[in-house]
Amino acid sequence: MQLSAALVLVACLLVIPLIFILLDLWAGVRKAQQRGDKIRSNKMKRTVNKISKYYNAVLALCVVDAVQIAAFCFMARFYDWTPYTIPIFTIIGVLFVAGVEIKSIIEPANEKESRERDDIMALAVALAGCEKDPKKIAQAVADFFSASTDKKDEFNS
């Protein structure tokens, strides 16, 4: 009976990250509309990538919990020791995903604008320090875009 209850719990836990990711997508679309941004397919692709990354982690934690629960069932059957068969690692992983997504949902829309404004100011300062040398200007712009891409990749990881 405990094993079937644990399996039902894990099945429910596997749905929770998807719900929070979809809520974050909905909130992101709403925030983009508030800012007047266009909804682009690359943002949707980021959501799909996020789903795959989160589920990779959650499913790995499910495997750890399966081993833990199997060991507990073995102990219960052969040693009459009945520990609790709770998928604790999966629960912790799902709570972490939910926390990250809730933070993203409640993040104000203007916070993204202020980050983008700070990036543009950093580029302006870098260009001001280049005087009128085209090579330095080109290098500063290239550095800005590579750093910007690195930040986006780091954020989306």
Image (tube, rainbow, N blue to C red):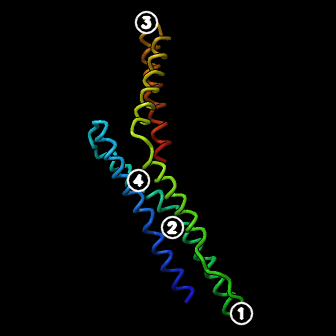
Q: How crowded is mark 3: few (under 14 residues within 10 Å), some or many (20 or more)?
A: few
Q: Of tags 1 and 2, which is closer to the observer? A: 1
Mark sitting on residue 59: 2
Q: Residue 106 carries which label?
A: none
What residue is disc 4 on?
Answer: 49
Residue 113 image point, x, y percent:
40, 32
Q: Which of marks 1 and 2 is nearer the N terminus?
A: 2
Q: How far apart are the alpha carbons under marks 1 and 2?
A: 30 Å
Q: Residue at x 43, y 15 (%)?
A: 137
Label 2, label 4: how many angstroms apart (C-alpha)? Answer: 15 Å
The quarter of the rendered structure image containing the N terminus is bottom right
Depicted 45 relative to depicted 12: above or below: above
Q: Is residue 78 above or below residue 42?
A: below
Going from N to C along the chain, the mark reached first, 3 or 2, is 2
Q: On the image, numbered disc 1 is attached to which residue?
A: 80
Alpha-carbon span between mark 1 and mark 4? 45 Å
- Disc 3 designates what residue? 132
* Mark 1 residue element: loop
